[in-house]
């Protein structure tokens, strides 16, 4: 008999919401290890891209007027898109819904501070419409992140309910002799 560590030992600390509980209750140890290692790697990519996004938004927001690329009538859409991408990325990178409120407030405050600084830059002005577009983008971004988390949970539940033969036919997991010997097979 192969000794397996309990699934909870493989869980990263920052899984969104009850995703960790779903993985412990509904997944065997092998699947749990594979999913959590993927999530752990994905979180670092999301965190790095979130940091790069924050820096990029900060730099573009603080460019003097003459150096700004012309956005014309799409200015508010670009604000909403930038802050929506930041919120979705941050929501997936930094964990559960409890942190989303703090992250959303931090992103909104970041946008508000950048708008305030724009008031002293040459060729730039403060715009409350930009602040509103930033806030709308944050709300939409967290909505997208919430849907992604819900779809991930649904996929985990569905994969766990499928019989082993059907998982193999659908290409989810095919146990091989070496994988079975190491205790990493799904079946």
Image (cartoon, rainbow, N blue to C red):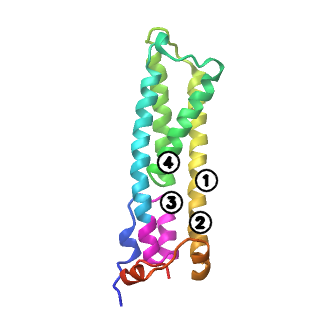
Q: Earlier in the sequence, mark 3 or mark 2?
A: 3
How many residues crowd mark 1 within 10 Å: few (<14), some (14–19), many (20+)? Answer: few
Residue reaching furthest front? Answer: 177
User: What range of the chain is rendered magenta?
Assistant: 14-35
Q: Residue 120: which quarter of the image? A: top left
Measured in 3D between alpha carbons, the distance from the residue under mark 2 to the one under mark 4, in whole angstroms, is 19 Å
Q: Are marks 2 and 4 in contact (CB under 8 Å)?
A: no
Nearest the viewer among 113 and 183 is 183
Q: Residues within 10 Å of mark 3 (few under 14, many from 20)?
A: some
Extreme residue toward the right, this view? 73
Q: Secondary structure at mark 3?
A: loop
Nearest to N terminus: mark 1 or mark 4: 4
* Residue behind mark 1: 147
133 on left or right of 37: right
Residue holding disc 3:
17
How far is the residue under mark 3 from the one under mark 4? 11 Å
Residue that label 4 marks: 91
């Amino acid at each position: 008999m192969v000794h397996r560590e309990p699934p909870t030992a493989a869980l990263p600390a920052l899984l969104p919401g009850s995703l960790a509980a779903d993985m412990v209750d509904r997944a065997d140890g092998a699947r749990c290890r594979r999913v959590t290692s993927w999530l752990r790697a994905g979180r670092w990519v999301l965190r790095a891209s979130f940091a790069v996004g924050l820096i990029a938004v900060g730099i573009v927001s603080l460019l003097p007027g003459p150096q700004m690329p012309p956005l014309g009538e799409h200015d508010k859409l670009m604000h909403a898109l930038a802050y929506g991408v930041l919120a979705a990325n941050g929501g997936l990178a930094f964990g559960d819904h409890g942190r989303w409120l703090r992250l959303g407030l931090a992103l909104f405050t970041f946008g508000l501070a950048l708008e305030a600084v724009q008031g002293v830059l040459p060729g730039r002005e403060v715009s409350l419409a930009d602040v509103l577009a930033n806030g709308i983008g944050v709300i939409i971004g967290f909505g997208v992140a919430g849907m992604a988390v819900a779809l991930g949970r649904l996929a985990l539940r569905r994969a766990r309910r499928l019989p082993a033969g059907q998982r193999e036919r659908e290409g989810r997991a095919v146990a091989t002799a070496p994988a079975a010997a190491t205790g990493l097979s799904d079946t």
